[in-house]
Amino acid sequence: MKERRNFYRSLYAQPDAPLTVIQVNYRILMLKLRMHPDHDYVELQAGYLKAAMTILNDPLKRAIYDRQLQKRYSIRVLSLGSFASGIVKSVSDCAMTQTNRRNYYRVLQIQPDAPAEIITGSYQALLHYPFQNIDLLGEAYTVLANPAARLRYDAYLAGKWEYSEKSLMPVDQVKHPGYPNDALDVVPTAVDGARMALSHCIFCHAAYAKQTGPYQQHACLECGSPLPESTETSFEQKHRTNIRIHMRGKFEYYLFWPDTPSEGILQDLSPRGTRFFAETTLDLHEVIKIDAPNFRAVAKVIHLHQIQPFVSVGARFLTVKFEQERGGFLAVHV
């Protein structure tokens, strides 16, 4: 499973985070990996984390990496994490000028999808870092360390909820001496159950909670890729026609996220997969994200055929979402 996020996203750190935060995050993530039962997964993920740390721990290598990264993405985009996605509304420039408008994730130098251990570790590291606003750190930690308050704050950042100092204050509180403002935890609720039901996007590996009922999440909030469908929907999908239609049409595909897309030209399309001409070199079994005018998909490369100056690629859909669920879903704008 290839890591498709930049090094800061992998370590849940802001792009301008001090080295002490990056080092703490790295140690926490490595400790968490030791408790994972899948040894192959542990070895692979540990390799990604070590590669990221090798670059970010060296001032010269980090400066070169930052310069290349910031040629393609602004600090604002890199710092917003999943909130920079086109699926989720990013924080508008004016939103942070009203009432309060500090980004608590920026204050704690972490990414918006950072796990609870990272939040605590970064907060404690920054407490001992020079020139810090201790009151502001405590304010940010009080909100982000509380699952219910964090959910409301995330909704505010996503543009789905209006900010209110009072509504961010936690309820069902348990005080813990020694934390800022007696930082609070909520009594275990459905939030804990949701954590246990977490799954991960096939393409970018961002976590999401499985939902039941009519209001399911259909796209990854990080990269916008379609998520695996329910058993019932998948059963219906398998019984649709598998006719392959020849066509031409341009679309974009991604090898990493975030990344600059490459352009492909469709050769044919079916509900199970597609063939297309690629302008970049792809590897067999490579997993790619496809954004076409009438469908989005995550696909796995299953065969390659050189046709100068392009490569003809055959890809099988791992997940797919057509613009039209029924009828003429194969229409393509050329």
Image: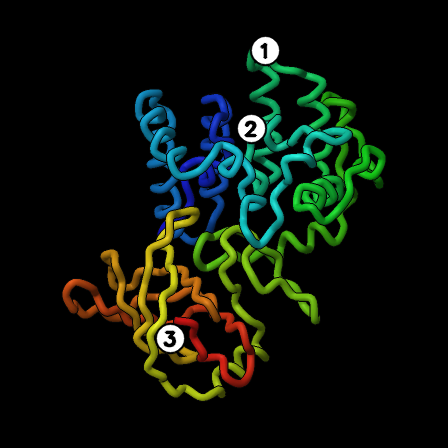
Of marks 1 and 3, which one's residue comes earlier in the chain? 1
Res. 108 visible in picture: yes
Viewer-side residue, 301 vs 146: 301
Check residue 109 in the rendering and tell me which mark sits there, or answer none: 2
In the displayed structure, 209 sits above or below 133; it is below
| Residue 181 appears left or right of 121 | right
In the displayed structure, 234 sits above or below 16; it is below
Residue at (16% x, 69% y) in the render: 307
Secondary structure beneath dot 1 equals loop
- Which residue carries the number 3 mark? 273
Viewer-side residue, 248 vs 143: 248
Viewer-side residue, 87 vs 185: 87
Disc 1 marks a residue whose amino acid type is Phe
Disc 2 marks a residue whose amino acid type is Gln
Question: Which one is in front in this view, the residue at disc 3 or the one at disc 2?
Answer: 3
Q: Position of residue 134 (x, y in %)?
A: 68, 16
| Residue 147 appears left or right of 132 | right
User: In which image quadrant can residue 303 be found?
Assistant: bottom left
